Every structure is written in C-alpha cells, then in structure tokens.
Amino acid sequence: MQESPASRILIVEDDRTWLAMVTRLFRNREPDCACLTATDLASALPLLATPGLDLVLLDLNLPDSHGLETLRRVRGANREASVVVMTADDDEGLAMETLRQGAQDCFVKGAGDGPTLLRVARYARERMATERRLRRSEELFQAISENMMDLLAIVDGRGRRTFTSPSYARILGYGPGEGFPTLEEAVHPDDLPGVLEALDRLIAQGSIPVLEFRLRHRDGSYRVLEARAARFGGSGPPQGLVVARDVTDRRQAEQERAALEVSLRQAQKLESVGQLASGIAHEINTPIQFVHMNLTLLKKSFASLTGLLDLYRGAAAPDPGLRAAEEAADLEYLRGELPKVLQESLDGVQRVARIVRAMKEFTHPGAKEPTILDVNRLAAGAATIARNEWKYVATLDLDLEEGLPAVRGHAAELSQAFLNLIVNAAHAIQARGGMGQITVSTRRAGELVEIRVRDTGTGIPPEHQARVFEPFYTTKGVGKGTGQGLTICYQNIVNLHGGKIFFETEPGAGTTFVIQLPGEA
C-alpha cells in the first residue's frame, strides 16, 4: 500500500522554465513532498481543494488573473495552506500588501537562489502552522468562554479588565448586545476595596486566596461570587486570569440549612420543655387545688368565726382583761384585713391555676384527629403564656366575643399560631420603643370565626410585606428569630385548618394579623 506524502505543494506559475526549476528544487530537497503544478488560475483552483495541501507558491500574474486579485481568489479557495507569492517585481509596497491580503511571505524571482526559496517556504509553513494553532486556541477559548457558566475575566497590571466572558452579562441579567456596568460599578461598595486589593496582590504575588464578593444584578439585587485567580504573562506584561462562580443559590441553601438546623434544635428544645412543662403543670395542679380549697375554707370559716365572736361579745358582760387582750391582738385590724388577704391569696391561686391550665393545654400533644375547640379559651391561654414577652413593653387587652361558634381543629397548633402572633406583636412594639398596646379580639364573621391580633409597633415596611410568610425570612437581629414563626402560623392556619391568615399594616403605626377559621354550625 502506497504511503501518503508527508506534504503537498501547489506551484502556480505560467513561466514553464521557472515552474520546472522550482518543481525540481522541491522534489530534490523534499523527496517525500508531492508537487502539484498549474500554469493558470483556472487549473489551480480545483487543486487548492487537495487534502493535505500545506504550501502554495503563487505567481500573481497569470494568463487568466493578474495582481492581488489572484491572491484573493486563491485565499478564498483555501485559507489553511501557506502562500508564498513569487513575483519578478522588487516592489516593497506590493510585498506588504500581499502580506495584508493573507500571504505568509513574498519571494522576488532573481533576487534569491534555490536555498533562499526553500528557507522562505519553510518559514512560511511554520508561521502558518503557528497561526493555525493560535487560531484554534482562540476558537477553543472563545467556545469555552461563551458556554461556561462561570465568569472568566482577564485583567491587566492595573487591575483593568481586558476581557470578560459573556457569562458576566448573563450573571448580571443583561442580554446580548446590552451595555452592562463595569466591575467597579457592579461590585458591592462594601466589597470593592477588598476586590481591588486582591487584584493588586494577584499581579504582585501571582495568586490570591479564594475571594468572595457581591455583584449587583440588573434588578438591584446582589449575586454572590466565589473567585479564584492566577497570574500569567511570561516575558510580557503581567496579567491576571480570574474565574468566578455564582454561588448565590449555594450560599442561600447553606443559610437555610443552618437556619433549619437552628429551628430543629429549637424544636427539640421546645419538645423537651413542653414535656417538662406538662409534667410540672400536672404536679402543680393537685397541690394548687388543695391550696385553693383550703383558702376557700379559711375564708368561709373566718366569716363564721367573726360572726360567732360578735354573738359572744353581745352575750358576755364587758371584761377589761378581755378587752385588753383584743387590743393587744389587734383584733379589729385582723377582722378587716384577713378577708382581704384571703381573697388576694385566692385570686393569686386562681391565676396560677389559669397559667397551669394554659400550660397543660398548650403542651398537650393533642389528638391526631381534629376536635371541637373554644377559640376564646385558646386565645386567652396564649396571652397568659406569652405574658413574660409582653408585660414589659405593652398592655394586652382581650376583647373576646361571647357565644362564638366552636371550631374544629388541633388545640396545640392553634395555640402555637396565636402565641407566635402575640410574641411578634410584643417584639414589634419593643423595636419601636416605649409602652405599646396589644389587642387580641375574636368575633363572628358570617360563617367564620375571626381572631385579630393588633399591635402599635413599627408596622411592616412595603419591601418586606410580600415575604413575611416565607420560611426563614426574618428582619430581626441575630438571636431574635429564625424566620419560622409566621411560616408556622400560615401552615397551622391554612394548611392544617383550611383557614386564612392575612395582615393589615401601616408602617410606623402598627400591624393587625387576621385569622379566619371555619365555624361549626
């Protein structure tokens, strides 16, 4: 099987003597080279499509084509082969124009010998091979930069961008052909000094640690980017290659996961506290009942004793010694104060009993199936449990309509929703400063039972109103909330009970959260 030649050369020359000499020269010096010949452009054009053709020796003036037009037509038919123009005119202007039109070199007939022509041809091939590799490298780089999701940028020694991949515009939300901000304009003002310092360090030291910064999106939000960079340039001016990845979604997922872990830990703590509170409430309930019964007995007994004492006084003759003893014991004072003390003690015990009862209802796991519930009782219980949150910042009024229809639901979940709204109201008032007012009211609204929790706090700014029920969304400071309170309210009211929850707010004046639940006929 005949091997393919190492290379193919096309010699286009109408001077047959010169054509024969050049052909013989290349065949003698390059035995493995196949020489193709043509004496006019018409016969040369089909040969330009020969596979493996890597060199064209071209006379510009042919019987059917003249001057630079000959070169343009050859270049149009084959852009991969090296072209060396052979001309009898030692015209420097013509030589420069042939280079601009795509020739690799120009050889003046009669001004050089055979070895010179061979050397010119070799250099032309090498330049063409280098240009081909460079072009392919540029095409590969362009394809990568156009299709990669990461941002790719090249900066000069002053930190100025000399190249930015199309992904930069995509990350910032701009379409093809649209103008977009410079790096200095897009970087978050708080991050810009660190970015500029990192670019200076990159050029000076050759590398930088992983850098995270924010870029402003077209819609005004900020995307979080994580960048790596390296210096290059060799013997030329130093430049920096920066590759940055949009990690906004990853950072958000990490924050949500961290918040979820905090929420889960809090839920576990609350579950333990709930179990403990339920046990304590059960243990306290019995002795409190005894204390209440005994105080009631004491109050009734004291009233009976004072009545009996009055009878004795009326029946017995005055006795100075007895009178002195009564005065020493301050009997009249005791007769007036002890009933008050006993009543205050009874009131205190009843309050403790209400707290214990509310704790038992709130911490009770409840039935899996919904039961008939008294909304007024749940709302009052939530207010009692939350007292420590609101008593220092607000007064709380209960405006509970009597004779409300019952609702069918889950007591613990509804109590949790009411409690979250009351606690949020207290926090809103605390953020505003000074003593405020919380009003928890219930009323019938057609076939619905409506619960309102109104506060005189800060209100909800317009930019936050659309997101208040989103999981993990919070405007409170660190340690003040996980962004789950209103989400739990929404889930408990809407998803679990088929109700509605919405709010009415006036920034700077306060907010009212409204819950509507289906009433039982």
Image (cartoon, rainbow, N blue to C red):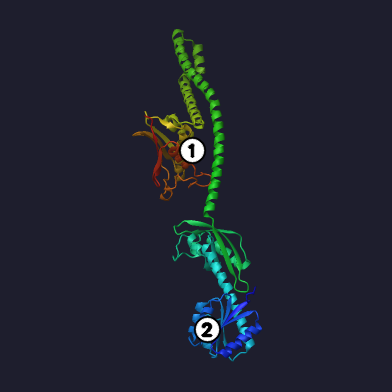
Helix, strand or loop at mark 1: helix
In front here: 462 or 406? 406
- When the figure is inspected, residue 85 is found, relative to residue 245, above or below; the finding is below
Q: Amino acid at mark 2?
A: Thr
Quadrant for residue 158, please give it: bottom right
Choose between 327 and 303: the one closer to the eye: 303
Residue type beneath disc 1: Glu
Which residue position is annotated with label 2?
98
Q: Which residue appears at 63% of the width and 84% of the height?
A: 26
Q: Residue furthest front?
A: 1
What residue does disc 1 label?
A: 389
Answer above or below: position of 13 versus 5.
below
Q: Position of residue 178 (x, y in %)?
A: 44, 65
- Density class for disc 1 (Cα within 10 Å; few <14, some 14-19, many ≥20) is some
> Residue 315 at x, y = what percent?
45, 7
SS assignment at label 2: helix
- The numbered mark, 2 or 1, whose residue comes first in the sequence reads 2
Viewer can see residue 393: no
Location of residue 304 with respect to 240 vertically, above or below: above
Which quarter of the figure is the C terminus placed in?
top left
Q: Quadrant of the N terminus?
A: bottom right
Q: Is residue 465 visible?
A: yes
Q: What is the x, y in percent for residue 151? A: 53, 62
As drawn, the label of residue 513 is: none
Left or right of 400, for residue 477: right
Q: x, y percentage for residue 106? A: 56, 85
Q: Nearer the viewer, mark 2 or mark 1?
A: 2
**Crowding near pointer 2: few (<14 within 10 Å), some, many (20+)?**
many
Residue nearest the viewer, comparing 106 with 408 = 106
Q: Residue at x 46, y 14 (%)?
A: 304
Q: Quadrant of residue 199 in the image?
A: bottom right
Q: Could you say which is closer to the camera, residue 72 or residue 279?
A: 72
